[in-house]
Image: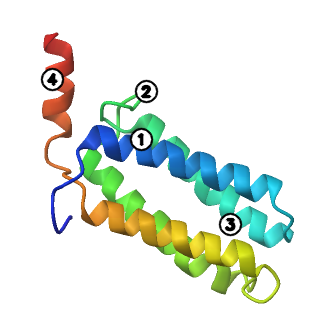
Amino acid sequence: MSLVKLIPPWLHGVADYSSAALLLVVSVLVDGTAEAKAVGIGVGLTILLLSVFTRYRLGVIRVVPFKVHAVGDYAAGALLLLGPLVAMITDTDRGLTYFFWGVGAALIGGSLLTNYDIADRELSDLSDR
């Protein structure tokens, strides 16, 4: 699922929560159409919930395997890249469109660099302490 396994799961988790918070805050505070705000809030909440339920160091409930979480990351990135086109907001909400495209590209890029194979090992290391 990744090209190069550079990013450990704990750092990926930091990026997950950061991107969710950024999407939610920007979508609420920036002036934009309801459609544009819906794209950002919808994807932001999805990333947040997926992160809370993922079985990795920063997960809270830890039921979703990290490799399944990866599918959600790629889907969220794709939604952010395609959402503005589908919602037809590229002309009315250019700033948010560019922001969504940037975050979407970052999500996919980060996912391509994440080591999805060591999340369970990280968790067992925590329980051994």
Q: Residues within 10 Å of mark 3 (few under 14, many from 20)?
A: many
Q: Secondary structure at mark 4?
A: helix
* Image quadrant in which you'd find residue 66: top left
> Could you give the CA–CA distance between mark 1 and mark 2, rounded to whole angstroms?
13 Å
53 or 19, which is in the foreground? 19
According to the picture, the residue beneath numbered tag 4 turns out to be: 124
Q: Residues within 10 Å of mark 4 (few under 14, many from 20)?
A: few
Q: Single out the mark in the foreground, 1 or 4.
A: 1
| Residue 126 located left or right of residue 15 | left
Q: Position of residue 118 (x, y in %)?
A: 14, 41
Which badge, 4 or 2, is on the more N-terminal residue? 2
According to the picture, the residue beneath numbered tag 1 turns out to be: 14
Query: Would you place residue 28 above or below residue 77 in this image?
Result: above
- Residue 39's tag is 3
According to the picture, the residue beneath numbered tag 2 turns out to be: 60
Q: Residue furthest top?
A: 129
